[in-house]
Image (cartoon, grey):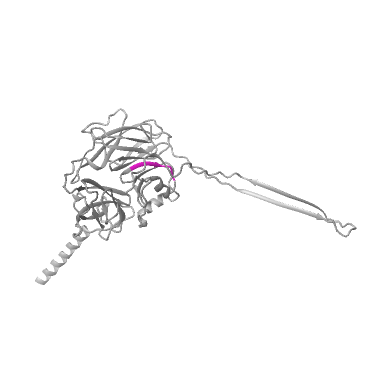
Amino acid sequence: MRLFRGLASLVITGFALAVVLTTVWPTHTSAADRYGANVALQATSSTCSSPLPQPLGGPVKADGSQTMMVCGLVATLPNGIRAPEIAGTVSVSVGLLNGSAKTASFVTDSRGVFTMTYQGAGGVTATDALTINYPGDSQHYSIGLTGPEATPVPAGPIPPFDFHADFRDPSSRCGGPSDFPGSSRTLGPVPADGSRPKTLCALASGYRSVYDNTGIRAPRIPITVTASIGLLNGAHSQSFSTDGDGMFGLRYEVSGGLAGTDTITITAAAGGTSTYTVTLTGSTPTPTPTATASITVTVAPTAATTATPVPTATPVPTATASVTATATTTATPTVTPTPGAGTITAGSPPPANGGFAVFVFSGGTNAQLVTAAGCPTGRGVFWVANSAGDFVVYVVGTQIEAVNSQWNQLFATGIPANQPIIGTCR
């Protein structure tokens, strides 16, 4: 009887352990997953803990004498399942990764975890911006750097900044301190014939401090707002500062009458970007006819030669010849290269020493984009929004093919004209 009870207890314990392991360590992912990351700074002598602490942590000495470990856990959204073998990059604006780099690549292990080292730099109190880029999205964190005197870091709001936006009727104001716009990244629908313009209302928020990731309003911060198709106060791009409540409002309208989607991007000069997809209603675009051309050339030579000898020692030939040629030509449309390809037509290139910029690229190759951005050799990270509203990243100089695979698929024949792009030279 005791033996039977012991075996039963062992079976039940084993079953419970299997359930716990299955619950805590799931690792299933699929190609359709979106990803999120938890990141912590830990001592280099430690191992990545689970679950990872939040927020990122700090402070870190700004003179480079202190080396910390960046410990990251990547999981699928919204179910939170660990994501193994996911490639991505980490970028910082002030400190150094793995001893000398501003941008470092990673691939998560079988637990969905990656690690790399971090050191402060600059020698003075500052806030470093750390960005994680992985398939389909990116996340931003702040690290407090302290100088030799350990000067306290001022209270927020501090970057990276986030934005919450929605559309309202032009007769409605964007509101005051108690008014928070929506948090959806999909806006609309908006008629594409210009019959019903909207007011784009948005609220900017930042972190309370480098040690507290509580979101608070961000008043009077410089921002740039761009729209790929629609007009914002009559232009595709506007630069200004949020008001005293951290809000702003812009008139948004679309003409042309064709159904589709527009992309609105809000970028803070100090760091932080939010992208929205706008649904446009109207008529279905007419497919562009495909041009065909042919050229046919026919040449039919005919010749007859008659020679009559004369009673002299040297014969003199008399020859008659005719050649007839006919040609039929169907005109072929000529493709003229777009003038000004490989240039920035709106906005400004990213600062060479770090920071973000939003600009419009005239189209061309990846190499032309890097040249137009003017980043130092081997540096530069660029983002665009695809038709689903997700970010697609291009990292200059990465040795991991998977990092830029989505970008290369999206622009297999080159970057199109008038393409809005977010860039940084980190």
Judge whether residue 325 can be spotted in this image. yes
Name the spot of residue 84 as percent of width and height, x first: 28, 58
- In the rendered image, residue 361 lying in the magenta stretch gets the answer yes
Q: Is residue 310 above or below residue 174?
A: below
Q: Nearer the viewer, residue 314 or 275?
A: 314
Q: Nearer the viewer, residue 351 or 114?
A: 351
Please give left or right for residue 129 compared with residue 329 in the image: left
Tally of numbered tags: 0
- In the rendered image, residue 281 lying in the magenta stretch gets the answer no
Q: Is residue 88 above or below residue 177?
A: below
Q: Residue at x 69, y 51 (%)?
A: 299
- Quadrant holding the N terminus: bottom left
Q: Which residues are magenta?
A: 357-363
Instruction: Specify the quadrant of the image occupied by residue 214.
Output: top left
Q: Residue at x 26, y 48 (%)?
A: 94
Name the spot of residue 266 as percent of width and height, x first: 31, 39
Name the spot of residue 181 as percent of width and height, x first: 26, 36
Please give left or right for residue 70 compared with residue 338 in the image: left
Q: Residue at x 63, y 45 (%)?
A: 329
Name the spot of residue 358 as percent of width and height, x first: 35, 41
